[in-house]
Image (spheres, rainbow, N blue to C red):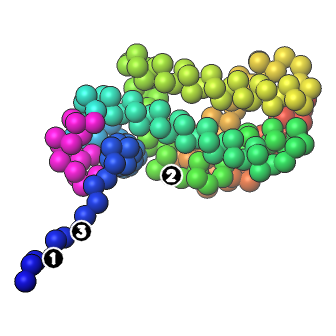
């Protein structure tokens, strides 16, 4: 009688990289930069430290990949909100701006990861480039939506509204009881109405 062979599937390289990125984001969210290290990430991902080094040159490269992946995820969320809003330019603009105050962007764990990314962007050139590209992309898309609404000086309005959304999102993430998501949405709507 032959012993049955245990069936297993080997995860693809993309799946392993994604698992490490997800584990890094979770570590940053839960423990901040100080508690995010190779051992913690690998324990969270359920892999050996050697596997991390197989896919990434080191923890700095992994954190940068996590920032890029998180930025890409946010970009997809905002794009989906715009598409769901239909064809009305004003509704599309509103959807883009207010998506920051709805799940999954309001996930409390996202704050921990973003604050780590922002801190690193001040001292690490690679993280600063990712930050600059991410924010430039957000503002460019916002500028397009503002122009579709006939906004004058859409570039400056995009900078101002981005800062307002970031500030409200940060305060809401730090203290959700202070004003609430619907109040943030109302503030953005009021500002956009006044500016347009």
| Residue located at (28% from left, 36% from top) | 55
Q: Estimate the x, y position of residue 48 in percent, counting from the top left.
A: 17, 48
Report the magenta residues as a range: 39-55
Asked if residue 44 lies left or right of residue 115, the reply is left
Q: Quadrant of the N terminus?
A: bottom left
Whether label 2 touches label 1, CB < 8 Å: no
Work out whether mark 2 precedes mark 1 in sequence or the reverse, and give the earlier one: 1
Q: Which residue lies furthest to the front in this view?
A: 1
Please give the residue where the numbered disc 2 appears in the rendered image: 108
Nearer to us of marks 2 and 3 is: 3
Q: Can residue 185 be seen in this view?
A: no
Which residue occupies the foreground of this view, 25 or 186?
Answer: 25
Residue 45 included in the magenta stretch of the image: yes
Whether label 2 touches label 3, CB < 8 Å: no
- Could you classify mark 2 by the number of other residues whose Cα lies within 10 Å: few (under 14), some (14-19), or many (20 or more)? some
Please give the residue where the numbered disc 3 appears in the rendered image: 7
- Could you classify mark 3 by the number of other residues whose Cα lies within 10 Å: few (under 14), some (14-19), or many (20 or more)? few
Work out whether mark 2 precedes mark 3 in sequence or the reverse, and give the earlier one: 3
Q: In which quarter of the image is the C terminus?
A: top right
């Amino acid at each position: 009688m032959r012993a049955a062979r245990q069936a297993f599937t080997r995860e693809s390289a993309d799946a392993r990289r994604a698992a490490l990125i997800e584990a890094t984001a979770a570590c940053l969210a839960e423990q901040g930069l100080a508690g995010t290290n190779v051992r913690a990430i690998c324990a969270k991902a359920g892999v050996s430290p050697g596997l991390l080094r197989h896919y990434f040159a080191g923890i700095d490269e992994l954190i940068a990949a996590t920032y890029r992946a998180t930025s890409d995820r946010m970009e997809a969320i905002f794009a989906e909100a715009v598409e769901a809003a239909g064809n009305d330019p004003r509704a599309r603009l509103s959807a883009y701006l207010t998506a920051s105050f709805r799940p999954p962007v309001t996930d409390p764990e996202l704050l921990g990861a973003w604050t780590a990314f922002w801190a690193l962007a001040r001292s690490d050139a690679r993280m600063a480039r990712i930050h600059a590209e991410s924010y430039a992309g957000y503002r460019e898309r916002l500028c397009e939506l503002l122009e579709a609404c006939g906004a004058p000086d859409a570039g400056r309005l995009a900078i101002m509204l981005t800062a307002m959304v970031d500030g409200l999102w940060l305060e809401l993430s730090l203290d959700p009881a202070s004003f609430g998501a619907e109040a943030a949405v109302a503030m953005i709507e009021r500002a956009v109405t006044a500016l347009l």
